[in-house]
Image (cartoon, rainbow, N blue to C red):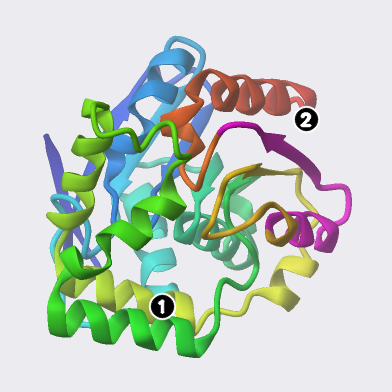
Amino acid sequence: MKFVRVNDVVLHYELSGSRVLPLIVFSNSLGTDLRIWDLVVERLAGRYRMLRYDKRGHGLSETPPGPYRLSDHVNDLAALMEHLSLNRAAIVGLSVGGLIAQGMAASRPERVAALVLSNTSHKIGTDDVWNERIRAVENEGLESIADMVLERWFSKPFRAPDNADFAGYKAMLTRSPAAGYAATCAAIRDADLTETTRALTLPVLCIAGDKDGATPPDLVRSTADLIGGAQFRLIENAGHIPCVEQPDEVADLISTFLKGVRYA
């Protein structure tokens, strides 16, 4: 395990692959850690150098007091890349990780070669939705919202009682730091990237899951429509975290896209 202190917070990260390979950075969704990318990383191994990390308030990274701003998460990723002397990357961001990816491309375009925006948008949810989520987590804990969240994360077949993987991902959610979860909800609530994302000119691929109850396909498509030249792809039989349910297709979409834009 590798850790580094940047911006007064300790981040957990994993960096794999040869330095001569093109770099991909993966940024996770709310209530998850870097392990959600395991199956995709396995499939892309040998073709890319890959950085995964736990954002503040998640996984094995520290949980400083909240609320957080999206810029906190963006600045953390930028500082992590700088610490590791990683100058330019394709960033693959899922949900809030996609907001972080968009923020990186807007504020530090020299570090970002292309974006893969998975199950995300330029604006996610309303103030009321996020304030209610924050109150529930702060007052009753993550267990109180787990069933609702998991219905949005995964398709019905994946949520079968005998699916050990589903049980594992439920544990990932419920064992996340509640304070970090709530603090990041505030960052999502306050983030409206409509104008900065509209101004992006780099290559972008937007991915949606057809069973996603958190960021439905039409919401993801609205972000693709906002960005000139952006591509949109729909993954069938997948909820909010297709890198877990359909890793073969996610890996193929990433590699095909990056080859097409001559990044790799």
Where is mark 1, residue-wise?
A: 187
Picture layout, residue 108 above or below residue 129: above
| Quarter of image, res 227 | bottom right
Residue 245 rendering spot, x and y as whole percentages: 45, 30
Is residue 223 on the magenta stretch? yes
Residue 221 rendering spot, x and y as whole percentages: 76, 54
Q: Residue at x 76, y 49 (%)?
A: 202
Magenta range: 220-237
Tell me the quarter of the image containing the C terminus.
top right
- The kind of residue tagged 1 is Ala
Q: Quick check: can you spot residue 67? A: no
Is residue 257 on the magenta stretch? no
Picture layout, residue 20 above or below residue 50: above
Q: Residue at x 79, y 68 (%)?
A: 198
Q: Residue at x 54, y 36 (%)?
A: 238
| Quarter of image, res 79 | bottom left
Where is mark 2, residue-wise?
A: 261
